[in-house]
Image: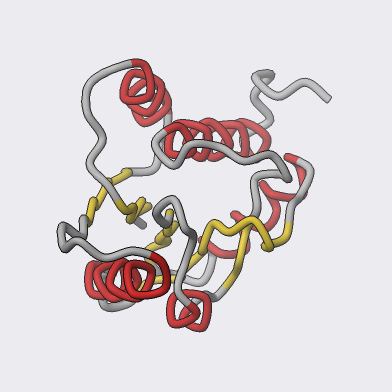
Amino acid sequence: MQINLVAVGRMKSGPERALYDQYAKRLSWPVRMIEVEEKKRVTGAELKKLEGEKLLAALPKSTFVVVLDENGQSFPSPVFAEKLDGWMSQGQDLSFLVGGADGHDQTVLDRANAVLSLGQATWPHMLIRGLLLEQLYRAQSILNNHPYHRA
C-alpha cells in the first residue's frame, strides 16, 4: 500500500520541506508526493477548476481519495487512526489531496471518498504537507501502540 500526497504547488527547500522529510522518514508506509501546478494567469473559480483537473489527472488509477478541505470532518487523533486503518484495509493506495490557496473545485470534492479537515485554523498549503505527515505518523504510532502519542 502506498500513500500519495497530491498537492498544488512546488515545495522548495526550507523548514516546511524539512518537516515533511522528517515525518516521511518515520513512516513505515511508503509516501510519494505528487505536485501539480497551474501556470496560466487565471484566478478564482477558473484557477480552482484548472488545479482540480490537474489534481484528478495526477491520481493513481485505483486509489482511495481523501480530500483535505476546511469543511471536512475533523477527528481526534485516536479516531483518525481508526479511520486511516479502515481506509487502508480496503486494499487500495491512499491519496490525500491538498488544494491551492483558494481550495478545491467541486469536481475534486465529488471524487472524494472522504473529506478531512485538520482543524478550523487556516494553514499555509506548504505547511499542511508536513502537518499531514505528522498526523499520519501519529496514527501509525497509535495503531502500533507506540508511546509517541500520549493521551
Q: Position of residue 100 (x, y in %)?
A: 39, 54
Q: Position of residue 58 (x, y in %)?
A: 23, 67
Location of the N terminus by quadrant is bottom left
Eyeballing the image, is 28 above or below 49?
above
Please name whichever residue, 121 or 115, is drawn nearer the observer in this view of the structure: 121
Furthest-right residue in this view: 151
At a point 16% along the width and 63% down the height, the residue shown is: 40
Q: Is residue 108 left or right of residue 7?
A: right
At a point 45% along the width and 32% down the height, the residue shown is: 127
Q: Is residue 100 left or right of residue 121?
A: left
At a point 65% along the width and 45% down the height, the residue shown is: 118
Location of the C terminus by quadrant is top right
Q: Is residue 128 left or right of residue 142?
A: left
Eyeballing the image, is 79 above or below 48?
above
At a point 42% along the width and 59% down the height, the residue shown is: 97
Please name whichever residue, 14 or 89, is drawn nearer the observer in this view of the structure: 14
Q: Position of residue 50 (x, y in %)?
A: 28, 72
Please name whichever residue, 57 or 95, is drawn nearer the observer in this view of the structure: 57
Please name whichever residue, 84 or 95, is drawn nearer the observer in this view of the structure: 95
Q: In terms of image quadrants, where is residue 76?
A: top right
